[in-house]
């Protein structure tokens, strides 16, 4: 990814987080944290990676976010000066769960060595 797309991804992350906390009224999206935004090189698509405080509502929250993506995209267009606003797709970020799994495996190995 280029430096420009990285910088734009960080700007999108902050702006989408602000939009979700201040503008969106849906209760399903209340406890969402935006982790990263990955933008395609032609600015056509953006994957927005998120986590949710309540893990059991993963599909419900993903559906609610993708349903609100048009509204979020419109607000994002007002906040960020960009000629072409990419289509937003919200994807649950499983990297935190993966990291926790690896950490548990390492702890288990360390306990066995003692």
Image (cartoon, rainbow, N blue to C red):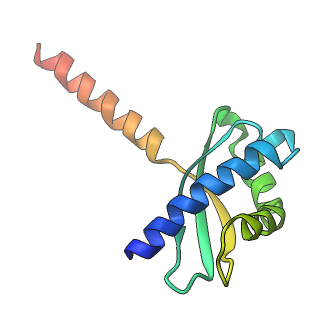
Above or below 9: residue 114: above
Measuring from the top left, give residue 1's x and y in whole percent: 39, 74
Task: Decide: is 64 above or below 25.
Answer: below
Which quadrant: the C terminus?
Answer: top left
**In the foreground, 109 or 71:** 71
The correct choice, above or below, for 104 with respect to 61 in the image is above
**Residue 71 position (above or below residue 104):** below
Q: Residue drawn 79% across and 44% down?
A: 22
x%, y% of residue 57? 73, 39
Q: Is residue 105 left or right of residue 93?
A: left
The residue lying toward the viewer, choosing from 100 and 13, is 13
Q: Residue furthest right?
A: 25
x 44%, y 75%: residue: 4
x, y (%) of residue 100?
Answer: 40, 34
Q: Hey, which quadrant is residue 32 in on the image? A: top right
State the residue at coordinates (67%, 83%). 84
Q: Nearer the viewer, residue 53 or 104?
A: 53
Coordinates of residue 89 in the picture (x, y in percent): 67, 66
Q: Residue furthest top?
A: 114
Q: Quadrant of residue 56?
A: top right
Q: Residue furthest bottom?
A: 42
Total numbered labels: 0
Residue that appears at 46% across and 41% down: 96
- Relative placement, left or right, of 45 versus 36 is right
Which one is nearer the viewer's eye here, 78 or 67? Answer: 78
């Amino acid at each position: 990814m280029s430096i420009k797309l990285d910088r734009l991804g960080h700007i999108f992350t902050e702006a989408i987080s602000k939009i979700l906390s201040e503008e969106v009224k849906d209760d399903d999206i209340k406890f969402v944290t935006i982790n990263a935004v990955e933008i395609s090189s032609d600015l056509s698509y953006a994957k927005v990676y998120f986590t949710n405080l309540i893990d059991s509502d993963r599909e419900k929250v993903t559906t609610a976010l993708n349903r609100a993506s048009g509204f979020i995209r419109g607000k994002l267009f007002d906040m960020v000066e960009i000629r072409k606003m990419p289509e937003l797709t919200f994807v649950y970020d499983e990297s935190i769960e993966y990291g926790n799994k690896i950490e548990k495996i390492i702890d288990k190995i360390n306990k066995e060595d003692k």
